Image (cartoon, rainbow, N blue to C red):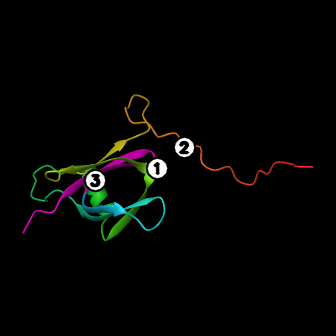
Amino acid sequence: MANLPVYKVIFHNHDQVFEMFARQIYQSDMWGFIEVEEFVFGERSQILVDPSEEKLKNEFAGVNRSYIPLQAIIRIDEVDKEGAAKISDGSSADGNVASFPFTGLQSGKKSSED
């Protein structure tokens, strides 16, 4: 049996940057979303426990599939093996992660034609 690929997904969630590992990632049928399935977390046999990974385990406990907006995705990598999931602060001014500029759609404004 061949080893299944592991993907590292880095994305924005509110003012934080999530770095997680999953076995299945694909374009969603819902327009503008990526589907992420089969989250992979580190083994519990480690002596040191990472609090951010524990927070992610608790937040995604029981989640079969997560839909992440394309605008929130920073990067997706196929990696050789899983690592530790983590959360970092994405709002600091000295960080090197910036949001992609997104103007959105302007709604409700019509030009007046006489």
Q: Residue at x 47, y 40 (%)?
A: 100
Q: Residue at x 77, y 50 (%)?
A: 109
Q: Which residue is mark 3?
A: 20
| x and y percentages locating residue 78 in the rendered image | 22, 51
Please tell me whether mark 1 sits on a helix, a strand or a loop: helix
Q: Which residues are magenta?
A: 1-21
Image quadrant for the N terminus? bottom left
Asked if the residues shown at circle 2 and circle 3 are in contact, with their CB atoms under 8 angstroms apart, the answer is no
Eyeballing the image, is 77 above or below 26? above
Q: Residue at x 59, y 43 (%)?
A: 103
Residue 33 image-quadrant placement:
bottom left
Q: Which residue is mark 2?
A: 102
Q: CA distance from mark 2 to mark 3?
A: 24 Å
Considering the whole magenta stretch, tell me its main secondary structure: strand
Crowd band around label 1 with a 10 angstrom C-alpha radius: few (<14), some (14–19), many (20+): some
Q: CA distance from mark 1 to mark 2?
A: 8 Å
Q: Which residue is mark 1?
A: 71
